[in-house]
Amino acid sequence: MKLEIKNLKFGYNSTPVLKSVNMVAEPMVTAIIGPNAVGKSTLLKCICGILKAEGSIVFNGKDLKEYRKDEVIKTISYLPQESSTSAVMTVLEATMLGKINSLGWRIKDEDLSASMDTLEKLGIEDLAMRPMNELSGGQKQMVSIAQSIIRKPKVLLMDEPTNSLDLQRQLELFDVIQTITEDNGMTTVVALHDLNLAARYAGNVVLMNGGKVVASGSPASVITEAMIRKVYGVNARVTLDGEGIPQVIPINSTRKCRIKKAITG
Amino acid sequence: MNVKSKEVYRKMTGRKYLFLLSILVAIFLTFILDIMTGPASLSAKEVISTIFFPAYSERSVQVIVWTFRLPVALMAVVTGITLGLAGANMQTILDNPLASPYTLGISAAAGFGAAMAIVFGVGVLPFAETLFVPVNAFVFSLLSCMAIYGIARFKRATSETIVLTGIAVLFLFDSLLALLEYTANPEQVQAIVFWLFGSLTKTTWTTLGITVGIVLLVIPLLAIDVWKLTALRLGDDKAKSLGVNVERMRLKGLILVSVLTSTAVAFVGTIGFIGLVAPHIARMLVGEDHRYFLPFSALSGAFILSTASVLSKVVVPGIIFPIGILTSLIGIPFFVWLLLYKKRGYW
Ligand SMILES: Nc1ncnc2c1ncn2[C@@H]1O[C@H](COP(=O)(O)OP(=O)(O)OP(=O)(O)O)[C@@H](O)[C@H]1O
Ligand SMILES: [Mg+2]
């Protein structure tokens, strides 16, 4: 189902961060790319309702404001960029929390097996009994991901899901994201820095700059050498592979390296 | 598949129930021991038979147990529960391992409120004479909670800011209390010292009844939020995205903490370290699923205070040692041990 964002405006303490954002996300993986501090995380927080923004967010033809609160929670799942937690609980318990609305004083078998299934899907079922505070950074990240996909949301928002993950895990994670998105007809929106991952796994790429969406479309149409030079200030070579997927090889920054200047005087 | 997950889960919860059962047994034992000890020692058999079949016991034993020792022993358990719950709730909502009614000055504020009522003979709210001391304690503990909450909200204060605010609150009310003592007459000073050191000896069935009533009132209010409180441990953003109204949870939690703390302070005085240590014990043994964490914190508190109550009578024979001093004396080394020997990264 379609997620439409129209004229969305938001600022922390009066300095505007999002200046009229317009974008559409279809039921597939949409990647949001853009430089640091451009407002990717802010946008995701506005969509899931943590931040209250001006403008409209329409899902499935109905404004999110018209949905009941519990419907919104059931529909949208959000993975924060920073999810460091000192919580003392096992991975299984933490995963189960993703279904908080169905949890009662007694744990239902159904919730228990949903947790285990999710851990298995992500290949971390061995961690089920381990305490969260003993996990590595990447393992913690995988648990957060399990938490956000366990309730099979219709809209999945992920902020830098590949944070702290090794190369293999990054690819495996995106395989899982792609599969569940297709299988459940989910609308998945992922904020990403890795342009190559965005190009390979996203059906639609949305580029943000200066608080606005400046381009969106297929990976090949958005991720170009000209765009990378203009938005990121980086000279890069972009080639299309056999399937027409762009591959980015960064070469150097167009800006004089400040660190080098500082060292050499 | 289903079988496996159930088995994993059962193994996990089985251990927690074992811990819960053990601490219940331990509390029962210290509770009986508490009634046995005192100027006239009673045997365990006498105690148990007098509790359950008072009609068959000697008159003097009946009086000792029912009039003097039973309310005190029960008060130790209930106040321990009160402080354990207050501390656990506070550490969760402020996301801070150093939070407790005592360390953040809420006990001090409640103590000051009580002392003010004693010295001036009036409460800030017009209440019946027997109640204005506790009501005053409540008003001041609520004020200090709100001050801490207000600063915590102001520009997304960090954990450190919250603790520092709490320490400021602690010093503020400590000096105000000293000022009161300075101006008070000797009788009033005596009464104030009672709040400062904490004592179970003034317990009556009435004060016990009120405390039990308040705990019974608070427990369901916490129970309905167990999952939300657990989710809060994942961080504000995650909790919010799971539909937890974080601000409201914090406000509600702080009000409950004030109610619990002021009740304890009003009737037994400021008793330190239970609110701090009990949640840490619970966290180490059963983790932070609040369905287990909250009851276990409460029971750890009960166990510590009940043990302290026994010790207060045996440390110096013939004298009842102030219980607040004892809990600090037991609590501090225990806490240091906890900090030094914790194997895992519990906060
Ligand atoms: N809680 C906050 N209070 C005030 N300003 C904030 C807050 N969070 C973010 N900002 C500001 O809003 C702007 C956008 O931040 P945001 O986190 O959305 O960027 P981002 O695109 O996700 O960046 P990154 O790629 O580094 O994650 C930044 O200038 C940041 O300083
Ligand atoms: Mg971000």
Image (cartoon, helix red, strand yellow):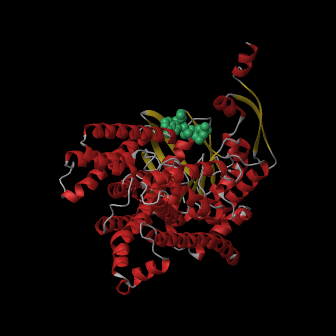
Residue at the image position 71 percent from the left and 21 percent from the top:
A259
Q: Is residue A251 above or below residue B251?
A: above
Q: Nearer the viewer, residue B20 or A202?
A: B20
Specify the quarter for ligand 1: top right
Q: Quadrant of the N terminus of chain A?
A: bottom right
Outermost residue toward the bottom?
Answer: B56
Query: Is residue B332 found left or right of A217 in the rendered image?
Result: left
Q: Quadrant of residue B47?
A: bottom left
Q: Up-down: is B143 above or below B129?
A: above
Q: Residue reaching furthest right?
A: A242
**Res B266 visible:** yes
Query: In the picture, residue B50 is in which quadrant?
Result: bottom left
Q: Position of residue B193 (x, y in %)?
A: 34, 48
Foreground of the two, B151 or B248: B151
- Whether residue B297 sits left or right of residue B247 in the image: it is right
Name the residue at 76% across, 14% down.
A264
Q: Is residue A238 left or right of residue B211?
A: right
Q: Find the residue positioned furthest to the top.
A: A265
Depth order, front residue of B311/A164: B311
Q: Is residue A2 at least partly visible in the picture?
A: no
Task: Tell me if B21 is positioned left or right of B199 in this view.
Answer: right
The picture places residue A68, in percent across and down from the top left corner, at 41, 61
Residue A118 position, x and y percent, is: 66, 65
Residue placed most toward the observer, A41 or B142: B142
- Residue A36 in the image: state x and y as whole percent: 61, 35
Q: Residue at x 65, y 53 (%)?
A: A133
Quarter the C terminus of chain A occupies: top right
Relative vertical location of residue B261 with respect to residue B14 in this rendering, above or below: above
